[in-house]
Image (tube, grey):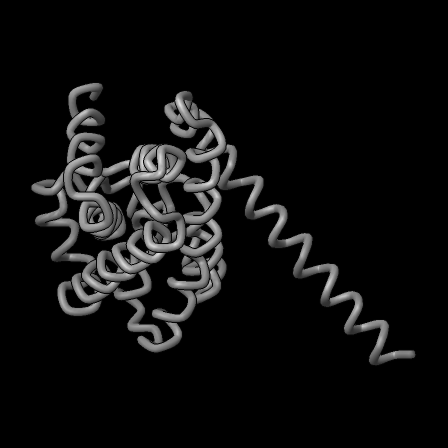
Amino acid sequence: MEQFFQIIVDYIEQWGYLAICIGMALESACIPVPSEIIFGFAGYMVYLGKLDFTTAAVAGVAGGLIGSVIAYLVGFWGGQPFVSAYGKYILLSASHVSLAQNWFDKYGLRAVFFSRLLPVVRTFISLPAGFAGVNFSRFIIYTVLGSIPWTIGLLYAGQLLGENWQLVNTIGHRAGLIVLICLIGVFLYYYRKRYNQTNS
């Protein structure tokens, strides 16, 4: 695993934004490439002045969208039987797909947004969205909006930690939950504010 992480780091150091985009495309296409390592090191490169924060964030979101579309289309055209039969060849865990399916069954298209902030589920949520054939335009919008806070949060953490950027991999799962809680808090705040204005 350490060697695998080092390969990711080496590619980002050599290819910069392109490596970030490809890495996130792989993760979002259900290949187990940890975004915590990608953005943690990318944030460190920003800290060193070798990458631009905004461009790195755009590359990450774009890669995530590309991979998510690929996974959606696989789910849409291949369906569950195809994924069950051939998923093992790309290290696709049946339990992880089942977890994402449960989230989608419970929350519908909203899960495409919120699950981008959750470990494991964010990688596989596009498949059940494809199985269900949800509206493609809305899928794109929810995917991008859900990817932005996760991308910016991890990049900033890597930049903030500097030489200790590896800690992003340790706190990444917790960070996702924290960001999700914050988003829910913001949503409830504006909902309550709007409700009070309407009834005043």
In x, y percent, where is residue 179?
A: 55, 45
The one nearer the camera, 83 or 170, is: 170
**Please, is residue 195 above or below residue 166 in the view?**
below
Residue at position x 29%, y 73% in the image? 133
Name, please, the residue furthest toward the front.
49
Does the image show residue 17? yes
In x, y percent, where is residue 43?
A: 38, 38
Residue at position x 67%, y 57% in the image? 186
Name, please, the residue furthest toward the right.
200
Q: How many marks?
A: 0
Residue at position x 34%, y 70% in the image? 140
The one nearer the camera, 95 or 129, is: 129
Does the image show residue 105? no
The answer to which image quadrant residue 93 occupies is top left
Residue at position x 15%, y 57% in the image? 81
Q: Is 194 on the left-hand or right-hand side of 175?
A: right
Q: Is 165 on the left-hand or right-hand side of 185?
A: left
In x, y percent, where is residue 58?
A: 34, 57
The answer to which image quadrant residue 158 occupies is top left
